[in-house]
Amino acid sequence: MTTKLSHTEKINTVKVTSSNVISKFGDILFDYVNSVFLSSVANGGLWLSLYQSSEVFISVIFNFLGGVLSDTGNRKKIIWHCDLISGLVCILLAIFIPHVFFIYAIIIINIILAIISSYRSPAYKAVFREIVQKEHLNQVNSVLEIAKQVIQITGPTGALIIAHFFDNRFALIFDGISFIISGLLIRKLTILSAPVKKKSSKKTFSQIREGLNYIFHNREILIIITFSSIVNFVIAGYNLILPFSTYAFSDSHLKAYAVLLTAESIGGLLGATASTLIKKTPTTNKLLFLIFLDGLALMPSERIYHLSRP
C-alpha cells in the first residue's frame, strides 16, 4: 500500500510543479513570439531555421556535460544559478539591445539559453530523487505530467493573447521574470535525502563510452534510435514551417499557428492517455509498426488541406 506524502513532500511538490508551470509558459511565450516575428521578416525561413537548429546543435554538444555536472554537483544550486543567469540575460538584452540588432539578439539569446538548459535539465530531472521519498516518485511525476500537459494546451492561447498586446521585448522580459521566479521556487526546496555522487568525472565518461558501445553492438536498439532520428528529422521540418501556417490560412480569422500548437498539445495528451491502454510489450516490431502508422496518418494531410480550401 502506498503511503501518503508527508507535509514537506507536499510543499516540495507544489514548489516544483509551480516552478515547472511558470518556466514552461515562459518558454512557450518566448518561442511563439520569436517564431512569429522571425517568420514575418525578410528571409524568415533562414532566420527561423537558424533559431531552431542552433538549439538542437547546442543540446547535442553540451547535454552530456550537463549530465556529468549533475552527477557531481549540488543540483538545487545548479538549477537556481542557471535560472538566475537565464533570467538576467533575457531581461538585460530586452532592455538594452537596439531594434536594428534584435534579430541577431534573438538567435544569440536562444543559443545562450540552450547552453544553460543543457546543464539545467539533467539537474532538474535528478533533483526529484532528493525532495520526495523513493516510493512517492511516480506520484509526484504524475502530478508534474498533468501540469505539463495542461500548460501545453493552454499556453499557446495565453501566448497568443499576450503577443496581441505586447512585442518581443515584453516576451523576453516576461520569460526572464519567469526564469527567476522558477529558480527561487527551486531554491526554497527542502532536500530530504543527500544526492548520491559519482566518485569522479572519469567514471562518468567511462559509463558514457560503455553506453555508446552497447548501443552500437545491440542491433534492435540501434534500429530504434535510427528510425527515431529520422522521425525527429521530419518533425524538425514540420516545426520549421509551422510558424508560417498563419500565412497559409490568411483567409481565416483564426491564428493558425496558435491553433495548431494547441491541437498538437491536445493530441499529445490523448496519445499519452492511449499509450497507457496499450499492452506494454515494447518489441522492436511493435515500435516500428507504430511509427509506420504515424506516417500513414499524415499522408492524406495535404489532400485534406486542398479539399478544405474554397
Image: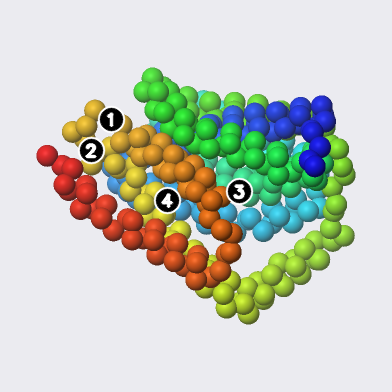
- Between 116 and 253, the one nearer to me in the picture: 253
Number of marks present in the image shown: 4
Residue projecting furthest to the left:
310
Residue 85 in view: no
Would residue 244 appear left or right of 184 to someone viewing this image?
Answer: left
Q: Which residue is mark 3?
A: 115
Q: State which quadrant residue 308 falls in.
A: top left
Residue of label 1: 254
Question: Residue at coordinates 76% horizontally, 29% vertically from top-left?
Answer: 10
Q: Are marks 1 and 2 in contact (CB under 8 Å)?
A: yes
Expressed as whole percent of the image width and height from the top left, the position of residue 137 reads: 74, 43
Judging by the rendered image, the residue that carries numbered circle 2 is: 249
Q: CA distance from mark 3 to mark 4?
A: 15 Å
Q: Is residue 219 left or right of residue 229?
A: right
Three-letter amino acid code at the position of disc 3: Ile
Q: Amino acid at mark 2?
A: Phe
Front in this rendered view, residue 71 or 110 = 71
Q: Residue 50 shows which numbered tag?
A: 4
Q: Secondary structure at mark 2?
A: loop
234, above or below 28, in the image: below
| Crowding at mark 1 (Cα within 10 Å: few <14, some 14-19, many 20+) | few
